[in-house]
Every structure is written in C-alpha cells, then in structure tokens.
Amino acid sequence: MKNRKAKRILIFIFLLMSILFGVFYYIYKEVSGFDSVIYPGVFIEGIDLTAKTKNEAKNIIESKYSKVIVRKNITISWNDKKYNLSYAKLNPGYNIQETIDNAYSYGKNLSIFSKYKIIKSKSIQNYLLKFSYDKKAMDRFIDSIEKDINKEAENAKINVNKGSISIVQDKKGFKLEKDKLKKILYSKMDGKNLKDINEKAPVKTQEAKIKKKQLETVNSNISSYTTNYGSISSPQRANNIVISTKAISGTLLMPGESFSFNNTVGPRTEKRGYQGAPVIIGNKIESGLGGGICQVSGTLYNAMLKANINATERVRHTFPSTYVPIGMDATIDYGNIDYKFKNTLTYPIYIEGITNGANVTFNIYSNSSLKNKTYNISSEIYETITPKEQYIDDASIPLGKTEIVQEAHTGYKVKVYKSTVENDSVVKKELLYTDFYKPVDKIIKRGTKK
C-alpha cells in the first residue's frame, strides 16, 4: 500500500512538473518571440508597431512623417499676392529614433511573467513624437512678408505748377499683424498637421489722415506777398534766402494746425548749406550763418496777414528792415526767437515759396470763397525818437581822432492796421498791434592819447 501511494505521489509530482515546465516553456516561447521586436499594443502616434523590428518601425514612421512633411508647403495669401515657403527650408525633424528606442524597450526589463502579461494584455502604450523646426527661418519668412506688405498711408498732396493746382490722391496704408500671423503659424507647426498650410495674412488697413476730398477745397490763390532781395543781397545772403524758402514751400496746414518757422526751416548750419551773411546781433550788424532769412520770415508774415491769419508769435527787429514797411517785419533766431501762426481758417492752406534771383514770393492757396474779402495791411509812425551821441574817451586812440563803435538808428513807435475790403469798400479797419523800435545811440570813441 505504501509503495503504491508513493508511486502515485511521484506520478503526480512528475505530471505537475511536466505541466509547470510546459507552461513555463510556453511562456518562454511566447516572450522570446518578441525579444528582438516591439511588444504588442505598442504604438507611435497611433500607428501599431506590434512585432516590428527597430528598422521596420523606423521605415514605417519615416514614411508617414519625415518623408511626407518635407514635401509640404506654407502659403500666405494677401490680396492678389501669395508668399510661399517649403517645409524643407525649415529643416523639420522628429525624434523618431529616440521614440522607437523607447517603444522597443517597453517591457523589456521586466520579469518573464510581467513580459508575458504585457504581451497577452490588450492594453495600449502610445508614444508621441517630438517635432522641431527652425523657428528663425520661419521668423525670417514672416519678416519678408511684413517688409513687402507694410506701407504707411500716404496723405493726399497738393501740387502747384505756375499757379495751376492739382491734388494727388491719398493712399491707404497696410500693416501686417505680425504677432498674430506668428501665433497662427506656430500653432499649425505641431508636426501632426501633414497637410499644406494655407492662411490669409492678417493685415490692418490704415486710412490716410488727409483725404483728397479735403484738399479739393483748396482751389485758389487767396494771398501773395513779394519782397526784393536781389538789390540788397550778397551771394551768400541770397543763398540763405533760397534754401529757407525751399524748406517752407509745400507746407500744408489743415484747419487748426500750427506753423513754426524754426521747426520748418530747421537749424542754420554749414552742413545744411547756409553761409555767413549780415545779421542783426544786439544793436549791430554782424556776419552770421543764415543771415538774410529774416527776409523770408518777413515776407511769409505779410502773406499770412493778407490771408487773414495773424501771428501767434512774432518779434520785430531791433530796427526797421528795408525790404518791408516799418512794423511789418518778423525776426527769427533759431532756438530763441520764432515766427508762429495757426491756421484759423475753415479750409486747409497751402504755402508756395518762390525765388527767382531777385525776389522772394509767398503764395497762399485755399478756398476761393475766402476771396470775397481781401485784407490790406498798413502801418503808420506815430512817434519818432532821435538817437543821441555818446562819447567814450579812449587813451589808446591819438588825440583828435575818433572811432565809431555803434551807428545810430532812429527810434519809432508804429501802429499796424488791417483793413477788411468787401465789394471794393473798406468795411472794417482795426489796429492789429503797436511796435516800438527803440532808438540806438551813436557811440563814438574819442582819442585822448598825446
């Protein structure tokens, strides 16, 4: 009985061992079959790579992504223009090898039973690719689009040729919304979108501030004033008059806008072409850069007064000028003294400056309805002050000799009037202002040296 029982136990153990061995062998065979390939349920970007070798997996993924994306294009459209960029120029790439290595290694370091469990389970392990590209190349592409699209709006302009007025059409401006386009393209460049990218460029339209319709109201010469410089100017002084007149000519002022002579003409420097010519400094006439351009400011001042536009800032000379009536001059000194006015009309004004070697003229253009009234400017001296003579003894000058240090200039008190003329009749005469040209005494050095 004991032998029979022992025999049965041995048979049972043998059978159990055989079963266990068979099970283990089966598991081993199942697992070892995936030693050199990717386990079941392992995906990359949703692509099943079960039982694929690394090379097979690489070929599959590359054919689906790397080889496809380099053939794609980006097209940005705006109006009738198209801007194209090939993906290939962006040097696009995926971390394919790294991702395949991770997919291949999945479960490989576990126990044989854990490996078997993975192989037989229906769970999915999906790996995602990382995409990269040259963002600087993309930015350069966007910059090139911006450079081509961006244009400042152009205001309508006035051209005057021999008194004939023409208006140049205003133009719209365009500005690429660069950051917006970047955001759009960056979001599309995720490596998963394997289609061509076609987008419309986000562009803002900018309207011109001054429209042609506004300037069409400028249709007539409403004022003109001329002074002669040819008979009183050196070549240097004439040069300065020409340069400063050109700087002013073409000025357009909309209603309410202000004009500054110094801001418009700019600094008077040799680099800008100005030369030395007589200027009034204190009570004397000396040579200075830009000498003579006070005649330009004075001529413009009178043209504006005749257009019924008064100065908001104006200073007389130390003594009267020869090229305009007394009380109707306007001195300037860059950084110190300016001539300014504001367009108080309800229409734009256009300033044309002309020099011809003898005269400087300013023509003021605006709406013809303003010519229903004209304005005459006049001045009168209501007091004259005789200068005195002052003597200064000087021991360095021989006795009986004299030297004039400062010439005398008569002083004047002046009233300036504006007469409004309508239908050939003066309907109004008003005092604009008074000027006082202080007398300048003659100063003489008297020799005392014996």
Image: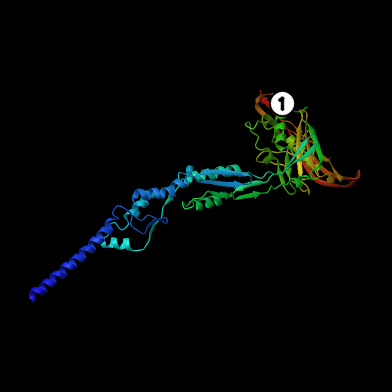
The correct choice, above or below, for 162 with respect to 179 in the image is: above
Q: Which of 259 and 98 is in front in this view?
A: 98
The image position of residue 336, as x and y in percent, is: 66, 41
The image position of residue 331, as x and y in percent, is: 72, 38
Q: Which of 382 and 192 is in front in this view?
A: 192
Disc 1 crowd, CA 10 A, few/some/many (<14, 14-19, 20+): few
In the picture provided, is 219 more to the left or to the right than 185?
right
Residue under label 1, please give it. Answer: 235
Query: What residue is shown at x 19% (from left), y 68% (from top)?
Result: 16
The correct choice, above or below, for 190 with respect to 379 in the image is: below
Q: Which colour scheme is used?
A: rainbow
Number of numbered labels in the structure image:
1
Q: Which residue lies furthest to the bottom in this view?
A: 1
Residue 352 found in image quarter? top right
Q: What element carries label 1?
A: helix
Q: For the C terminus, give its image quadrant.
A: top right
In the picture provided, is 42 more to the left or to the right than 282?
left
Q: Which of 82 and 290 is in front in this view?
A: 82
Query: What residue is shown at x 56% (from left), y 52% (from top)?
Result: 180
Amino acid beneath label 1: Pro
In the picture provided, is 113 more to the left or to the right than 217?
left
The image position of residue 136, as x and y in percent, is: 48, 44
The image position of residue 197, as x and y in percent, is: 53, 49
- Residue 130 seen by the camera: yes
Q: Which of 43 and 254 is in front in this view?
A: 43
- Residue 111 seen by the camera: no
The correct choice, above or below, for 20 with respect to 91 in the image is: below
Q: For the N terminus, give its image quadrant.
A: bottom left
